[in-house]
Image (cartoon, grey):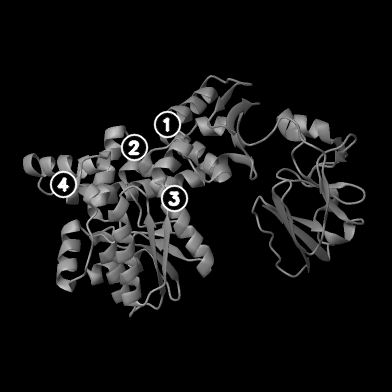
Amino acid sequence: MKNKVLSTIKDYNLIGENDNIVVGVSGGPDSMALLYVLLEIKDLINFNIYIAHVNHGVRGEDAKADQLFVEGMAKKLGLPYYTKNVNMVEYGKEKGISSEEAGRELRYGFFREILELVGGGKIAVAHNMNDQAETLIMRFLRGTGIDGLKGMDFVIKDIIRPILGISRKEIETYIKEKEIETVLDKTNLEPIYSRNKVRLELIPYIEENFNPNIVNTLWRTSRISSMDSEFLEEFSELRYNIIVKNQDKRSIILDGRKLLEEHRSIQQRIIRLAILKINDSLHGITEAQISSVINLLLTLGTGREVHLSNDIVAKLTYGDLIIEKGISKSINKYSYKLNFPGLNIINDIGYSFDIKVFDIYKDFNMNKDKNIKYFDLDKIKGELVVRNRIDGDRIIPFGMRGTKKLKDYFIDEKIPKELRDKIPLIVDDENILWVVGYRTNDLYKVTKKTKRILSIYYN
């Protein structure tokens, strides 16, 4: 088991030298096996282990006994130990979620508190091959696609699953061979939760009547689905970069015509990807809602909206699909001085501007990243400011001659009215340098005569 877990750690880059690893330990066989195998591997990779235990407040004295057991084990092993008492039932009622989901939120919230205390790192949890089988069955019964059938990942953000590829039988053998003490959570033996019913009743029934190797079969399914899902995600990201017209932390504008040229599967993935870029999560976003967004495009429903959550809206304007988060109908005027060179973080508007100054040199190549622009520094007059539009603003769009009213430029570019007051403008004492996310001013372009360059990267 040690060698298999070590291979997993190396293959998926789960743990590196000097990493801080918070190990969630309930005291049961799975988490104790995880703890001990990591201790073995610690001799080969130098990293720090912190034990974390949560008392969920639902099993009375049994839960307290488990808590004391894990505390004693931590002392015996000489490892830092953190514990917390919570009430997942009450928390679930307050949040309007199931007790299982409440317990999960409370656990990971506590684990991340520990990570902050120790200076960052990763959370190791004891999900294994059998847990993966249960997950796939539950998702299939609820209805899912290829992304759901890939199951849990070995690593996702700060969470790692070193024993995900280990079966429960292998864990039981390891526990017995190493003579590791464990505790038994009696509720795991009671079919009171959906997952318990799958584990205790459905999987044994399938093994007896249909496929004795169902756990391994589902594991192979998860690996195949994971591989296909990964390819589709990478392909969708490439197509997204072609289709996106503008993006910032609060809104995404997609070329509706180009999006409709994609296969339906890729359309859905691109829309989900756009939501993730402004929201960090797809929680609560259903396939039916994504389909409604695509139907909006198909029916050319200009002016119509699809509400994806309390603060995320998708709408069609000028043939473009706009996905916004938390944008109010009105916006105040703003103006902030930009220091250069230097990083300017402006929390009030949710943008940062990293400004650099350097002399031009032979064979200089400009970065083609949409978020970075270059200007002739010697043409800039006075201070740099970021603000939104005001009456009378004009610009000479890059590659054009003659000034144009900013209002007319917005109309020509088919920028929705509700976004026009929100677009940041980089200005000096005389002109607009850059309509951020769109065009720069031709007056400030870099030429063969340019000696010093000012670059601005916005995020």
Identity, as a three-letter code, of the amino acid under mark 1: Glu
Q: CA distance from mark 4 to mark 3?
A: 32 Å
Within-10-Å neighbours for mark 3: few <14, some 14–19, many 20+: some
Q: Can residue 414 be seen in this snapshot?
A: no
Please say if 98 is above or below 131. above
Which quarter of the figure has residue 205?
A: top left
Judge from the rendering whether residue 439 lies leftward or rightward of residue 216; answer left or right.
right
Q: Amino acid at mark 4?
A: Ile
Task: In the rendered view, tell whether residue 318 sits above or below residue 164.
Answer: above
Residue 300 appears in the rendering: yes
Residue 171 spot, x, y in % from top left:
20, 62
Could you say which is closer to the camera, residue 452 or residue 47?
47
Q: CA distance from mark 4 to mark 1?
A: 28 Å
Asked whether the residues under the numbered discs 4 and 1 touch, taking CB atoms below 8 Å apart as contact, a structural biologist would say no
> In the rendering, at what x and y percent does residue 311 appear?
59, 34
Q: CA distance from mark 2 to mark 4?
A: 20 Å
SS category of the residue bearing label 4: helix
Query: Which residue is drawn at the image coordinates 77% and 33% (left, top)?
Result: 410
Q: Position of residue 18 (x, y in %)?
A: 45, 76
**Image coordinates for residue 195, horizontal then vertical, percent:** 26, 42
Residue wearing tag 2: 145
Q: Earlier in the sequence, mark 3 or mark 1?
A: 3
| Element assignment for label 3 | helix
Secondary structure found at label 1: helix
Residue type pointed to by label 3: Leu
Neighbour class for label 1 at 10 Å: few (<14), some, many (≥20)?
few
| Label 2 or label 3, whichever comes before in sequence order | 3
Q: CA distance from mark 3 to mark 1?
A: 27 Å
Q: Which residue is mark 4?
A: 214
Q: Which residue is mark 3?
A: 106
Where is mark 1, residue-wise?
287
